[in-house]
Every structure is written in structure tokens, then in C-alpha cells.
Image: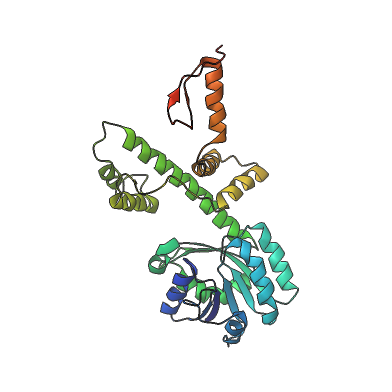
């Protein structure tokens, strides 16, 4: 097949290569002149000769709508647009309806695989009409891992991104659990070789996983992670997962805690913990650490 691919970053660039390795023709566009194939969206669309034309948009969620606004007038009725980024699932039905008014077809596709996707393949979760999915199936087959699984038509518009949202929420919780266990092992004086323990879990253990393998790789590079700051960004999917749980009445305390842990990591100095320290000092005279001196001072409070 032929495919136009918009966005050639950490995910889009390797996806282009995997598709080409699978025998497909890919014309990519990126604002980075060093990686782009086409000068602009118009030349990308003009370079596609198959009908219907298929355009895969692989850009951050905040940029999807501006790209679609620029792209839609360049397409013809029957062409298919795929949003493969981490968009909010509620946006997909709106986009499908808006493009549908122009005769264009729309699919949402959650993509997982990260920087390893080129080698190992990508897990794909697709939402949209079954006929449109079938039209693009050769593209999905080239991107997914070899074997029976790795691709799912999750449901109607929005289902692909909803499935990917839940996937990423689970990922948050798993990573947080692994990280807390690693910190406890690092802190316990009776443990002699933390990396060896982690390696031992990779075979036979019920908690073995690819994330555990990646944790083993990380400590092999930097055993105590001394070169890494304790700051973890959150890209939105964890928040959306917790909100969906609230909206649907589904309890998810582990995922919620992992999202809040990310928030804490992003604070250089926690305002809420300042107040906790202040209250402890007020009711019990507990020592306070002052910012100016970076020392612990015993400041009398009004103890109960």
C-alpha cells in the first residue's frame, strides 16, 4: 500500500522504516527538514496515487486538530485519515463527524511500542468502522508484531484511543510499583546486590515483564540511578484514565496513586508537605528544616 505519514519523531520515524521494510510505500512529512520526504502537506498528498489515499497523523494530541484543518481540504471523498497519537478518546467522534461531512473516513489508533517498535513491532488498538479498518489492514499487519496478537479492532470511533488510555494507566501503576520495590531494596542494608535480585525475577517469577527487563537494563547502566533526576513527566493518559474511572464509577486506587506520585516528582519543594511540617511543629514542637540554612531547627510550637 501507499501511506502518507505526518510526524516523523520518536514514534513516526521508526514506523516509517518498519512499513518500508514491510514493502509499503511511505511518504513522510515533518517540519524537521532533515527527516521529511515532502516539502509540505500538499506535496505529500499529491505524491499518493492509490485510491483511497490513506494518511496517518502521528503528532502530539494538541496539534492534531490544526493538522486536520490544514489536511482535510487537500483530500478527496473516500480518503482515510488515521490519528495514531495519544489523543483523548472523546475527541475522536467529533473528528469523525467533522471529516465525515467532507466525505472523509476516520480511524483512531492507539500505538504502543516506544523506541523498540521498529525491531519488535507495535501494539495497535483501532477504533472506527470495520470496512475502513479492513481497507487499511495491510498497514496494521506490517506495523504489529509477528504472531497472532498485537492488533485489535477495539470498537467504534474513540475505542482505540480509550483502550490505549487504559493501557497507559496500567503502565503508570506497574512502573510505580516496580519503582517503589526497587527503592525499598536499595534502602535495606541487609540486601547486598539489588541488580542481581532484579535479574533473578526475570525468569520464573510471577512479576516478570518487559518493564522489569527494562528496569534491569537501567540499573545495568547506572546501578543507583545517580545520574537521573527524580522527575517523571505525565503526558495526560494517566489523568484521563483516572477521570474515566470517576465518570464510570470504577475504583482504580493504584493507578490514581501512581498519577499523583508523578505530580509529587515534578515539585522541587512540595507546598503541601510544607504545611504538614508546619502543623507537626505547631502541635508537637517537631523540628523544622529551613530553606535558608538547609539545617534542621527546633522551632517551638503550640503542642497538644
Q: Where residue 76 sits: x, y (%)?
A: 68, 82
Q: Quadrant of the C terminus?
A: top right
* Number of marks in picture: 0
Q: Is residue 178 left or right of residue 133?
A: left
Q: Residue at x 58, y 52 (%)?
A: 236
Rendered view: 259 above or below 286: below
Q: Is residue 62 left or right of residue 8?
A: right
Q: Where residue 36 sits: x, y (%)?
A: 50, 78
Image quarter for residue 104?
A: bottom right
Q: Is residue 174 visible?
A: yes
Q: Is residue 3 left or right of residue 19?
A: right
Q: Residue at x 53, y 21 (%)?
A: 280
Q: Residue furthest front?
A: 292
Q: Where residue 246 sits: x, y (%)?
A: 64, 42
Q: Is residue 1 visible?
A: no
Image quarter for residue 125?
A: bottom right
Q: Residue furthest left?
A: 192
Q: Where residue 90 sits: x, y (%)?
A: 67, 57
Amino acid at each position: 500500500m501507499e501511506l502518507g505519514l505526518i510526524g516523523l519523531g520518536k514514534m513516526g520515524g521508526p514506523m516509517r522504516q518498519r512499513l518500508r521494510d514491510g514493502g509499503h510505500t511511505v511518504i513522510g512529512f515533518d517540519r524537521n527538514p532533515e527527516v521529511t520526504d515532502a516539502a509540505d502537506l500538499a506535496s505529500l498528498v499529491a505524491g499518493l496515487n492509490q485510491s483511497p489515499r490513506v494518511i496517518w497523523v502521528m503528532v502530539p494530541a494538541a496539534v492534531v486538530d490544526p493538522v486536520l484543518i490544514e489536511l482535510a481540504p487537500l483530500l478527496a471523498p473516500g480518503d482515510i485519515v488515521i490519528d495514531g497519537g495519544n489523543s483523548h478518546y472523546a475527541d475522536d467522534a467529533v473528528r469523525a463527524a467533522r471529516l465525515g461531512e467532507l466525505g472523509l473516513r476516520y480511524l483512531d489508533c492507539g500505538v504502543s511500542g516506544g523506541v523498540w517498535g521498529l525491531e519488535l513491532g507495535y501494539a495497535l488498538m483501532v477504533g472506527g468502522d470495520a470496512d475502513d479498518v479492513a481497507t487499511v489492514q495491510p498497514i496494521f499487519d506490517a506495523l504489529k508484531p509477528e504472531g497472532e496478537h498485537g492488533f485489535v479492532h477495539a470498537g467504534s470511533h474513540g475505542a482505540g484511543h480509550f483502550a490505549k488510555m487504559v493501557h497507559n494507566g496500567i503502565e503508570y501503576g506497574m512502573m510505580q510499583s516496580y519503582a517503589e520495590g526497587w527503592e525499598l531494596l536499595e534502602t535495606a542494608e541487609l540486601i547486598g546486590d539489588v541488580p542481581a535480585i532484579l535479574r533473578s525475577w526475570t525468569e520464573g517469577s510471577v512479576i516478570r515483564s518487559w518493564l522489569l527487563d527494562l528496569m534491569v537494563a537501567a540499573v545495568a547502566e547506572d546501578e543507583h540511578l545517580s545520574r537521573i533526576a527524580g522527575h517523571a513527566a505525565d503526558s495526560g493518559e494517566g489523568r484521563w484514565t483516572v477521570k474515566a474511572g470517576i465518570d464510570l464509577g470504577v475504583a482504580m486506587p493504584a493507578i490514581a496513586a501512581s498519577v499523583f506520585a508523578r505530580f509529587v516528582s515534578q515539585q522541587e519543594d512540595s507546598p503541601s508537605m510544607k504545611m504538614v511540617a508546619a502543623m507537626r511543629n505547631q502541635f508537637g514542637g517537631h523540628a523544622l528544616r529551613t530553606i535558608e540554612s538547609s539545617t534542621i531547627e527546633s522551632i517551638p510550637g503550640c503542642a497538644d
